[in-house]
Amino acid sequence: MKRDVSIVIAGAAGQGIETVADFMATVLKLSGYHVFVTREFMSRIRGGTNSLQIRICSERTAAYVRRTDLLVPLTEDAIPHLRKYRRTQEDTQFLGEEGIVGEQAGVDPDNVINVDFSGIAKEVGGKIYSNTVAAGVITSLFGVNLDIVRDYLERRFGDKGEDVVNENIDAYNRGVEIGNHLQQEGKLNYKVEKKNKVKDDILISGTESIGLGAIAGGCNFIASYPMSPSTGLLVFLSQQSKEFGIVVDQVEDEISGINKGLGAWYAGARAMITTSGGGFALMSEGLSLAGMTETPMVLHVAQRPGPATGLPTRTGQEDLKHVLGAAHGEFPRIVLTPGTYEDGFYLTQKAFNLADKYQVPVFVLTDQFFVDSSYNIPQLDISNLKVEKHIVKTDQGYQRYAITEDGISPRGIPGFGDGFVRADSDEHDENGHITEDMNLRIEMVNKRLHKKIEAIKEDYIYPELVGSEDYKTLVVAWGSNYYVVKEALDKLDLDDVALLHFKQVYPLPSDLKEHFETAEQILAVENNATGQFCDLLLTELGVSISQNDRLLKYDGLPFPVEMVTEFIEEATKRRR
């Protein structure tokens, strides 16, 4: 009985491996297995080599592993491509057509299982069913019930007609027959413990977790220009727009996107934009406008490697300093960094309330690995969630920028009350009139910057400590590296090592220093070249993490569990 099995499917863009992944993940989850799917793909519509990893587990995980137990290559380029990234090992088994996994692939014959997917598919009704045959072979290893498969195929292909559904079922059954035969011969034998409660979980992507959080937060307007890997959120909310009353505007550029979002908030809507680093770079002037006019804004920034266009479809954590320092002038902002899909949902929901309450931009900072992976989570609890609005009904003496003790002025919207709601991008007085009074300038900066920052810190979302509270080594991570560090610690089983995972990286209250003062050693894991969060901890809290204690990865791929495990193991040996 294995803890988990790692299956990798690789083929060309447009070859349908995404359909196979969705099929397999769904039916395996409904059969009682924890599943995790992560995708690695090139920046092209067709061709190249894409791959996806499906982990079938006895316990919940959402971490990428380099290990491949079973590889299903669908093109001749697949094996060399994966070897380049050390994705195949001596004991990796290869399942595929002879022309792909034969002698020319340079694979140990003992690890090769030839199955003529295309030939079988043609007998059923066409080569298009090759992937369904392959899915049948693989899922048969885990005892998937045919009724679950039949229900899935009817929902997935029902609109294409009964013949297509029946041919897919026939292709699947042909694959199951082969899979059963291979198990009987002892060539394929993977056993993972089932958990019945998993059947009631929901299988979602990171994009969907952010989108559902936005809906729960009362989002009713999104204005964005498509940019990988953020576009999925725009698509998801457009698909839900009629049911939840969301106005969707695919704008002409990112400058228009943020300005329309600010206009929507000014009018009383709850708006968001979604973009990546290059698109966000165009929004800096609009972001500064939000700071001066004290207009709420929710921005989802899905990171990818830069500079410039960089690696459009790969992952990284390179935009932390970008979102912290973008825009001219000084004003508050909040940066949330979900690590799990539960975080993605609840933090995005909270982002709208925080933006509304403090009248500041709130960032939900993710990355390609986070948004483009998927796994099962328990049903989300929405019973205690509230859409918190902080709009006031104005009177004749209304002052939009009234100086208050906590720095938060009452926010009115046009037409709601008798007051006049002014907004000015220049420095202004309490009524919103332009001013060049230097003393008033100081008061206004203190109000919207210093006082607000202190108030925001009172609402801080504290990091999650995973592991022993009596730690001597503390591993620091943020965003999508939650599960990879957690699994590494589980494997090492060290009673003096813990993970401190940050869900909010800015602003940071001073009492966080207590976590670091008791540690003999502080390690950090980040997907960038300079240790951007390490630098932030030094600036904000005076916490110093040496270069030797930083594990930095910036090749565009996520951290594999093996790399993080080795890093922590070697670092703790140095401490001892």
Image: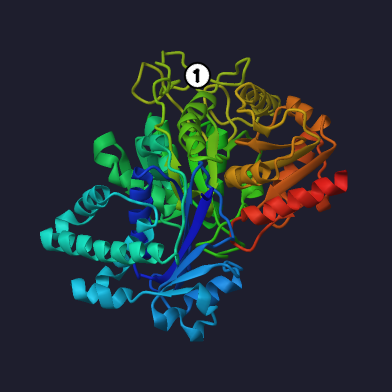
The residue tagged with tag 1: helix, strand or loop? loop
Task: Please state if 473 lies on the left or on the right of 503 as rendered.
Answer: right
Residue 493 in sight in this render: yes
Whether 171 is drawn above or below 35: the answer is below
Q: Quadrant of the C terminus?
A: top right
Residue 425 in sight in this render: no
Name the residue at the left extreme: 162
Q: Which amino acid does the dot numbered 1 rest on?
A: Pro
Q: As rendered, which of 74 and 548 lies closer to the eye? A: 74
Task: Please state if 566 lies on the left or on the right of 31 as rendered.
Answer: right
On the image, the x and y values in percent for residue 236 come to: 35, 47
Whether 118 is drawn above or below 459: the answer is below
Task: Please state if 521 lies on the left or on the right of 370 as rendered.
Answer: right
On the image, the x and y values in percent for residue 421 come to: 43, 25
On the image, the x and y values in percent for residue 69 come to: 52, 62
Name the residue at the front extreme: 185
Residue to which mark 1 is pinned: 410
Whether 297 is drawn above or below 128: the answer is above
Q: As rendered, which of 253 and 2 lies closer to the eye? A: 2
On the image, the x and y values in percent for residue 366 come to: 54, 46
Give the quarter of the image for residue 522. Answer: top right
